Image: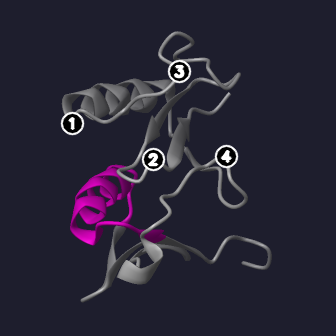
Amino acid sequence: MTTGLLHHVEIYVSDLSRSVEFWGWLLEELGYSIYQSWDKGRSWKLGETYIVLVQTEARFLDVPFHRCRTGLNHLAFHARSREQVDELARKLQGRNVNLLYLDKHPFAGGNYGVFFEDPDRIKIELVAPK
């Protein structure tokens, strides 16, 4: 039964090609597959859940995203293991992705994980099972 499970998340982005490069790599690392592609968007699917990126219209680009404003704060994904968290953290560093809370890594949120930002500074977590 899927009642109550997340169906999809749609994220408007400031630069679709830059975000597709970032999110495509990340989501494929986590087991997602490309689902849909069109001029102004792209989506990836894992099981019954999919994540959609849509290019923000130019008229709405005047105010950048900030996770401390009303709205989305962050997305947190399950990792299969601590080893996957460590491997992804190394890969993120190699891709020059902004890692957060390095002074507390890997227990910044109380769980074993890695915290980082997408190109629009949306915070993302990858959390290992306890």
Q: Secondary structure at mark 3?
A: loop
80 relative to 75, above or below: above
The residue at which mark 2 appears reads as: 121
- Amino acid type of disc 3? Tyr
Q: Residue furthest top?
A: 103
Q: CA distance from mark 1 to mark 2?
A: 15 Å
Q: Secondary structure at mark 4?
A: loop
Q: Using the rendered view, name the quadrant where residue 45 is placed.
A: bottom left
Of 123 and 47, nearer the camera is: 123
The picture places residue 87, in percent across and down from the top left corner, at: 33, 28
- Label 2 crowd bin: few (<14), some (14–19), many (20+), radius 10 Å: some
Q: CA distance from mark 4 to mark 2?
A: 11 Å
- Label 3 crowd bin: few (<14), some (14–19), many (20+), radius 10 Å: some
In magenta segment, residue 25? yes
Q: In this rendering, does residue 57 appear at all?
A: no
Q: Which mark is residue 30?
A: none
Query: Which residue is located at x 29 percent, y 70 percent?
Result: 16
Q: Secondary structure at mark 1?
A: loop
Q: Using the rendered view, name the quadrant where residue 98 is placed.
A: top left
* Magenta stretch prevailing secondary structure: helix
The residue at which mark 4 appears reads as: 68
Q: Earlier in the sequence, mark 4 or mark 2?
A: 4
Region rendered in magenta? 12-32
- Amino acid type of disc 1? Arg
Of 78 and 23, nearer the camera is: 23
Q: Earlier in the sequence, mark 1 or mark 2?
A: 1
The residue at which mark 3 appears reads as: 101
